[in-house]
Image: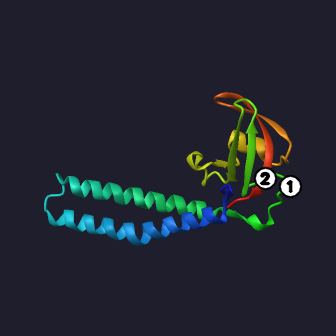
């Protein structure tokens, strides 16, 4: 079974590659040192430091495996080639929230990069799905957990 392609912006790809490099080069060495120190303390059966270091090692290896899977199946959106007449992954979109009478700005990214606190929404989220393919002036209705929300697309631009 072929794994599903993960859409990433170039910045998202760089971020994941940097995280993996940090985990492999820095964190692995740190944890190995902690395990070595804990072993030198003697009896491992009641050694909380050893158990904590082994748990941390397991978490690091799991994250490395997860990142390798994402990167192996990554499809990078070439933002220079994105058509800014229509909303797509890699675009920054300014919308008017008709329901709450306010302007909002979203960057449409792949699901692995989504971070609502930074205004990055996934192309797979309800809002992202509703906006993909729309043009300036279009009005979209989005069914969310908070109820139905209506957005009017004001501007589409290249992400910073």
Judging from the image, the colouring scheme is rainbow
* Residue at point 83%, 46% (across, down): 134
**In the structure shown, which secondary structural element does the residue marked by tag 1 occupy?**
loop
Label 1 – label 2 distance at C-alpha = 7 Å
Residues 35 and 153: in front is 153
Above/below status of 81 relative to 44: below
Mark 2 closeness class: few <14, some 14–19, many ≥20 residues within 10 Å: many
Mark 1 closeness class: few <14, some 14–19, many ≥20 residues within 10 Å: few
User: Quarter of the image holding residue 150?
Assistant: top right
Left or right of residue 15: residue 146? right
Q: Which mark is residue 62?
A: none
Q: Earlier in the sequence, mark 1 or mark 2?
A: 1
Disc 1 designates what residue?
Answer: 85
Tag 1–tag 2 contact (CB < 8 Å): yes
Measured from the top left, where is residue 67 in percent x and y?
53, 61
* Residue at point 66%, 60% (across, down): 8
Above/below status of 103 relative to 107: above
Split into 4 quadrants, where in the image is the N terminus?
bottom right
Query: Hey, which residue is sitting farthest top in the picture?
Result: 147
Residues 138 and 57: in front is 138
Q: Which mark is residue 156?
A: 2
Left or right of residue 35: residue 113? right
User: Quarter of the image holding residue 62?
Assistant: bottom left
**In the structure shown, which secondary structural element does the residue marked by tag 2 occupy?**
strand
Residues 1 and 152: in front is 152
Above/below status of 52 relative to 151: below
Query: Hey, which residue is sitting farthest front in the picture?
Result: 102
Left or right of residue 6: residue 130? right
Left or right of residue 51: residue 5? right
User: Quarter of the image holding residue 27?
Assistant: bottom left
Above/below status of 48 relative to 17: above
Measured from the top left, where is residue 17 in percent x and y?
55, 68
């Amino acid at each position: 079974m072929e794994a599903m392609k993960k859409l990433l912006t170039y910045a998202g790809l760089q971020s994941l590659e940097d995280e993996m490099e940090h985990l492999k080069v820095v964190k692995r060495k740190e944890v190995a040192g902690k395990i070595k120190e804990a072993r030198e303390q003697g009896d491992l059966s009641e050694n909380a430091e050893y158990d904590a270091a082994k748990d941390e090692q397991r978490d690091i290896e799991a994250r490395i495996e997860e990142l390798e899977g994402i990167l192996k199946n990554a499809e990078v959106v070439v933002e220079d080639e994105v058509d800014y007449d229509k909303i797509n992954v890699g675009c920054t979109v300014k919308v008017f929230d008709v329901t709450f009478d306010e302007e909002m700005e979203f960057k449409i990214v792949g699901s692995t990069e989504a971070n609502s606190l930074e205004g990055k929404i996934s192309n797979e989220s309800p809002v992202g799905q509703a906006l993909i393919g729309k043009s300036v002036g279009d009005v979209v209705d989005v069914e969310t957990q908070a109820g139905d929300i209506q957005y009017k697309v004001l501007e589409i631009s290249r992400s910073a």
